[in-house]
Image (cartoon, grey):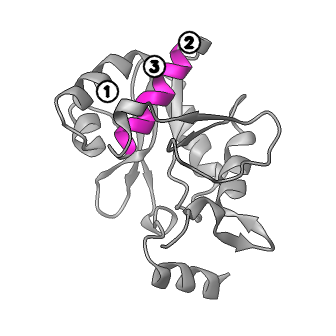
Amino acid sequence: MGCSKASLELRGGERFLDHAIERFASICPRVVISVGEDSKTSINHKNIISVPDQKQNICLGPMSGILACLQYATTQGFQGCFFTPIDVPNLKAIHLRLIKDRWGDDPSETVCAKNARRKTIEPLISIIPVSMHLSAKESIRKGELSVHRWLRDHNPIGVPIYDDYLKNINSPEDYESLRTIL
C-alpha cells in the first residue's frame, strides 16, 4: 500500500485505526494495539496501549503480534485477547459482539469469525485465550508462522459472518473501491 494501513482515511478524517478502536471500545474494557517495533503510526487516543513485537520476532508476521499481545495479556490478568486486523473496515461492532458472546460461553476456547459463504475460519478475527501464549511461542520457535494453521490445529469455534464484512483492503485498487462505496 505504500503506507501504514492504520493511517488510511476511511471517511470524514477517520482513519482505519480510529475505526478499529471505536469497534472495540464499545465491547471491550481495554483496547490494546499490536504494532511492529518500527511503527510510526500515531495512536492519538487516551487509554490505548500499544504492544510492540519483540525484537527477536520482528518480520514474522501476525504470529509475532499475537504472541506479544498474549504475553502482555497474561501479565495483566486477562483471560483472552480479541484480535482483528486493521484493514477490515466493513467489520462492525455487532459482529465482534457475536464473537465475544460465543466466547463468553467458555473462555478457555478459541472463537473465530467464520466466513459464512466459504465455511473457513478467519483466524485474525478471533478471541484467543491467554493460555495459548506458550503454544504461539512454540509455533514461532519452530518457524510455523501460519496463524490459520496454528488456530485450526486448536479446533476453534466458528461464528458465521458474511464475507462482505470480512473483506480486507490489500491493494490501492481495493482502497479506491472502498472509498467509492463510502
Q: Quadrant of residue 138?
A: top left
Q: Depth check: 100 or 42 in front?
A: 42
Three-letter amino acid code at the position of disc 1: Ala
Whichever of labels 2 and 1 marks the residue nearer the N terminus, that label is 2
Magenta segment range? 62-74
Q: Which residue is mark 3?
A: 130
Q: Compute the Cα span from label 2 to label 1.
A: 16 Å
Quadrant, the C terminus:
bottom right
- Number of the front mark, 1 or 3: 1
Left of 57 or right of it: where is 48?
Answer: right
Task: Tell me where residue 9 sits by quadrant.
Answer: bottom right
Q: Which amino acid lies under the numbered mark 3 shown in the image of this protein?
A: Val
In this rendering, the answer to whether 36 lies above or below 153 is below
Q: Mark 3 or 2 closer to N-term? A: 2
Q: Which mark is residue 83?
A: none
Q: Is residue 52 left or right of residue 145?
A: right
Which residue shows up at 54% across the image and 21% down it? 72
Residue 106 in view here? no
**Magenta highlight on residue 53:** no
Task: Report the disc number at residue 75.
Answer: 2
Quadrant housing residue 136? top left
Chief secondary structure of the magenta portion: helix
**Residue 64: within the magenta?**
yes
Mark 2: which secondary structure? helix
Where in the figure is residue 103, as x and y percent of width and height?
50, 29
- The disc label shown at residue 136, or none: 1
Q: Residues within 10 Å of mark 2 (few under 14, many from 20)?
A: few
